[in-house]
Image: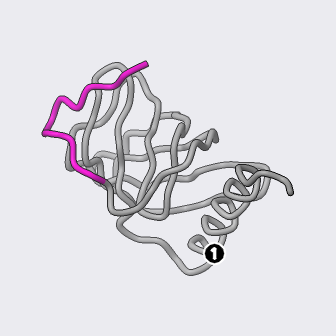
Amino acid sequence: MQRKNTSEPAKKRAVRRCAFVASVEVTDITSGTKLSARTSEIGMGGCYLDVLNPFPVGTELDLRILRDQGVLSVKAKVVYCDPKFGMGVAFTEIAAKDKALLESWLAEIVMLLKPVS
């Protein structure tokens, strides 16, 4: 499925994202509105959330990304959205313990992608 960026022209990410599927609890910090989503990509700087009714660009969020190996809690901001498909979010605040957890998840993904010698 090809996604269209409806809010602005595509920009190159500073940090690579990896395919990653996990459940996410999303909360709009201002309104308190909550929704459930799932990730399809993640990197050190943000992730893509698959959700039918994404929040508008600029919305500040609390995210709880749930995976067997732990729960990642971060603050994020919507940087682009694809109506009826999802939204790209940039992480704006991440505690040291959550950064370490995210790094371990990404290291695990990279190890799975490396060919076995």
Q: Is residue 38 left or right of residue 117?
A: left
Give, as a single range, the part of the protein colored magenta.
1-12
Q: How many marks?
A: 1
Q: Residue at x 56, y 73 (%)?
A: 99
Amino acid marked by disc 1? Ala
Pick the front one: 34 or 75: 75
Magenta stretch encompasses residue 94: no
Pick the front one: 35 or 14: 14
**Which part of the image, by quadrant, shows the C terminus?**
bottom right
Dot 1: what SS?
A: helix
Q: Residue at x 43, y 42 (%)?
A: 48
> How did the renderer colour the structure?
one colour
x then y, percent, for residue 26 = 46, 44
Residue indicated by mark 1: 100
Q: Is residue 87 left or right of residue 39?
A: left
Main secondary structure found in the magenta portion = loop
Magenta stretch encompasses residue 2: yes
Q: Quadrant of residue 77?
A: bottom left
**Which part of the image, by quadrant, shows the N terminus?**
top left
Q: Residue at x 55, y 35 (%)?
A: 38
The relative height of residue 82 versus residue 90 in the rendered view (above or below) is above
Q: Quadrant of residue 14?
A: bottom left
Pick the front one: 89 or 42: 42
Q: Residue at x 62, y 77 (%)?
A: 97
